[in-house]
Amino acid sequence: MYQCPKQTIQHSSIPLFSLVCLTFLNLSMKLQYSIIVPVYNRPKEVDELLESLTLLKGGISFEVIIVEDGSPNTSEKIVLKYREKLKINYFLTENQGAGKSRNYGIQKATGNYFIIFDSDCLIPENYLSAVDKQLQVKYTDAFGGPDAAHDSFTYVQKAINYSMTSILTTGGIRGNKNSVGKFQPRSFNLGISKKAFDKTKGFLDLKIAEDIDLTFRLWKYGYETQLIEDAFVYHKRRVDFKQFYKQTNAFGAARPFLNTRYPETAKITYWFPSVFLIGGFVSLFGILFKLPQGIYLYVLYFSVLALHAAIENKSIKVGGLAVFSTIVQFYGYGTGFLKSYFLKNKKP
């Protein structure tokens, strides 16, 4: 690293000299990116992810670390296909969970800034350029990016993506800068510096919400996070509603645990899906007493949601499916939250 030369200077020349030194220091502290991908039984998805990485533009160098988390159906042959196209390393470990696999991959990486993707993501060609540009303008030791639905996704995947990202469902907290305060990066699209990783020790041994837990510990140690809106990925998520229910139920169950561990981060908005769910049952019960006003409000809400989803996705079918996926999401999250809350916030 460049060091300012030791010499005697006049007091009046210090500001200019310091500026020159800082310029050299900034140039010498170039970010070196390592992309970390934990994998379990997803060779097809890994193939698509790696193919998308070969198409990245901007000329920014990076390495790829694939950590196979004890998969019976490995991605080794897929990785070999890309040896000539990408700087890539492949590690096969015993099954230890996504969090530990990410930590393992980071420990094997050579970069000073780590970007973590889920294996079922497709990366747009301008992703890394967007990240590098924003970190040069406003550096933070961690960041997150949104997710979007790719044209190749199924109708169900597009509906689920809408439910997870829309301003009408989650308030846009997963990727709308106008809807977030301090952004909580999610592990499907998360960046963290080596310095911050070393300080926090990375992900803890949690089955769910380990990314939010990491964010809270980053804040605790004084590290700043940010949303980089242009650094989005196409995230396939769950392929059917049954899997989506399990995922959202786990998310809901994890929140009371996090609220207990980090009480300063608790918000009343985390109760909204549960309140929405209870309100729905009360409204249905009200019909028996000829009080249908509550149901009218729900019908109005879902009608607006269906129209909005259809317009955003240019598909009436996605609009209809988005209603069902939102019901699944609120039911899964709401019941998981209530059960966890009244069972004294068990560790997820």
Image (cartoon, rainbow, N blue to C red):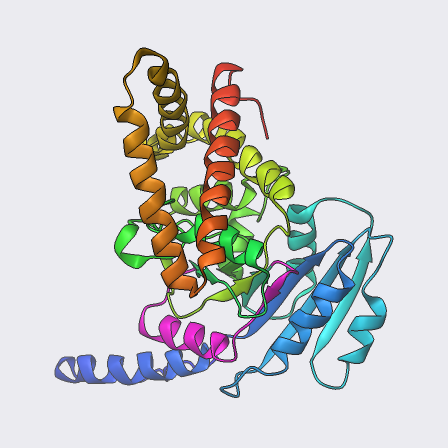
Q: Assign the C terminus to one quadrant of the image.
A: top right
Q: Position of residue 345 (x, y in %)?
A: 51, 21
The answer to which image quadrant residue 162 occupies is: bottom left
Instruction: Report the residue at 62% width, 76% height from top.
Output: 52
Q: Position of residue 231 (x, y in %)?
A: 44, 69
Q: Is residue 9 above or below residue 276?
A: below
Instruction: Report the residue at 41% width, 49% height from top.
Output: 184
Q: Nearer the viewer, residue 34 or 169?
A: 169
The answer to which image quadrant residue 64 occupies is: bottom right
Residue 97 visible at all: yes
Q: Position of residue 235 (x, y in %)?
A: 55, 60
Q: Is residue 299 above or below residue 6?
A: above
Q: Is residue 50 above or below residue 146?
A: below
Q: Is residue 243 magenta?
A: no
Q: Nearer the viewer, residue 176 or 274?
A: 274
Q: Is residue 247 above or below residue 291?
A: below
Magenta residues span 118-142
Instruction: Report the residue at 29% width, 25% height from top.
Output: 294
Q: Is residue 272 left or right of residue 88?
A: left
Q: Position of residue 87 (x, y in %)?
A: 69, 79
Q: Nearer the viewer, residue 213 or 327?
A: 327
Residue 196 visible at all: no
The answer to which image quadrant residue 21 occupies is: bottom left
Q: Is residue 147 left or right of residue 289?
A: right
Q: Nearer the viewer, residue 181 or 222?
A: 181
Instruction: Report the residue at 54% width, 68% height from top.
Output: 112
Q: Is residue 123 magenta?
A: yes
